[in-house]
Amino acid sequence: MASKVKLPKPEKQLKCHVRTGDKVIVLSGDNKGKTGTVIKVFPQDQRALVEGDAAVYDTKHVKANPQAGVEGGRVQRLRPLHVSKLALLDPTTNKPARVRHERGENGVVRVAKKSGHKFTANR
């Protein structure tokens, strides 16, 4: 298997259309069509951790270390998904939503293009 090439990270903070706590739907891959909730976003890597049906797990083999109190075996860890594979789930239509940004007195709000549903910041 070929090794992964690490590209240099950009100097300025990248934008990301998903935020922590958002309900998202997976657009491509093995989990296409499954939904979940965003736990954490890594904007520098353009990736997000998702829990629920859409969660993807990696298995890591851990060697036992009695001095540190670590039990050996296989450990399942969440694997981050690329944000381009995720779309916000529109609660009115239960379908993936494309969003636009509107400026209001409360700041910038994300709005679904088709239904007009406003996604409030739930941090």
Image (tube, rainbow, N blue to C red):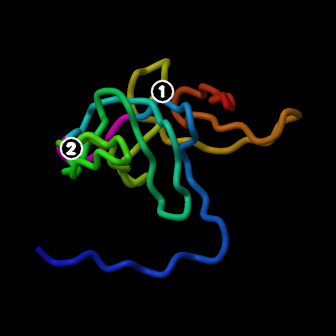
Q: Residue at x 65, y 38 (%)?
A: 110
Number of the label disc, if any, that sits on residue 29: none
The residue sitting at the right extreme is 105
Q: Nearer the viewer, residue 52 or 15?
A: 52
Instruction: Give the number of the mark in front: 1 or 2.
Output: 2
Q: Is residue 16 above or below residue 120?
A: below
The C terminus - image quarter: top right
Q: Is residue 26 magenta?
A: yes
Q: Of marks 1 and 2, which one's residue comes earlier in the chain?
A: 2
Q: Is residue 35 above or below residue 8?
A: above
Q: Is residue 13 above or below residue 97?
A: below
Number of the label disc, if any, that sits on residue 90: 1
Amino acid type, mark 1: Asp
Give left or right: position of 72 versus 93. Answer: left
How packed is label 1: few (under 14 Cα within 10 Å), some, or many (20 or more)?
Answer: many
Q: Position of residue 104 (x, y in %)?
A: 83, 36
How packed is label 2: few (under 14 Cα within 10 Å), some, or many (20 or more)?
Answer: few
Amino acid type, mark 2: Gly
The overriding secondary structure of the stretch rendered in magenta is: loop
Describe the element under mark 1 as helix, strand or loop: strand
Point out the stretch of residues depicted in magenta. 25-30
Disc 2 target residue: 72
Q: Residue at x 48, y 81 (%)?
A: 8
Q: Quadrant of residue 117?
A: top right
Q: Is residue 37 magenta?
A: no
Give left or right: position of 54 versus 37. Answer: left
Q: Are marks 1 and 2 in contact (CB under 8 Å)?
A: no
Q: Nearer the viewer, residue 45 or 89?
A: 45
